Image: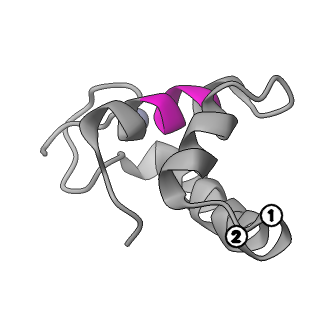
Amino acid sequence: MNKCLICERKSESLVCEQHSKVYKNILEGYELWKKAKGLSWNDYLSELSENRYAGAWVRLLAKKMLELGIRAP
Ligand SMILES: [Zn+2]
């Protein structure tokens, strides 16, 4: 993986520096949802990708991570 999943800019990690906050938000959200709802990582990404209250980038990134089968770190 050497491109940002959101903007396709070159990146060493899943997302570029500009979008690292989006990725961080997803990870932090998972900690909360796991506790509150007992969701698995995939269920979480799936719900998030369709959550109208989530930001557009969050939804996009969640969807791509789900499609690519990216696991929780
Ligand atoms: Zn990016």
Cα gap from disc 1 to disc 2, whole angstroms: 6 Å
- Is residue 60 rendered magenta in the image? yes
Residue 7 position, x and y percent, is: 38, 25
User: Does 49 sit above or below residue 40?
Assistant: above
Residue contact between numbered discs 1 and 2, judged by CB atoms under 8 Å: yes
- Is residue 21 rendered magenta in the image? no
Report the magenta stretch's main SS: helix
Q: The disc labelled 1 sits on which kind of residue?
A: Lys
Mark 2 burial class by Cα count in 10 Å: few <14, some 14-19, many 20+ = few
Q: Depth check: give the residue in front, 20 or 56.
A: 56
Q: Look at 49% across and 44% down and name the residue there.
A: 19
Is ligand 1 less than 8 Å from the beta carbon at label 1? no
Instruction: Please tell me whether mark 1 sits on a helix, a strand or a loop.
Output: helix
Q: Look at 25% across and 56% down and name the residue there.
A: 13
Q: Look at 78% across and 70% down and name the residue there.
A: 32
Mark 1 burial class by Cα count in 10 Å: few <14, some 14-19, many 20+ = few
Q: Which residue is mark 1?
A: 37
Q: If the picture is divided into quarters, which one holds ligand 1?
A: top left
Is ligand 1 less than 8 Å from the beta carbon at label 2? no
Instruction: Please tell me whether mark 2 sits on a helix, a strand or a loop.
Output: helix
Magenta stretch, residue numbers? 59-63
Q: The disc labelled 2 sits on which kind of residue?
A: Lys
Residue 37 position, x and y percent, is: 80, 63
In the image: residue 42, left or right of residue 8: right
Which quarter of the rendering shows the N terminus? top left
Residue 69 position, x and y percent, is: 28, 44
Q: Which residue is mark 2?
A: 34
User: Does 60 sit above or below residue 61?
Assistant: above
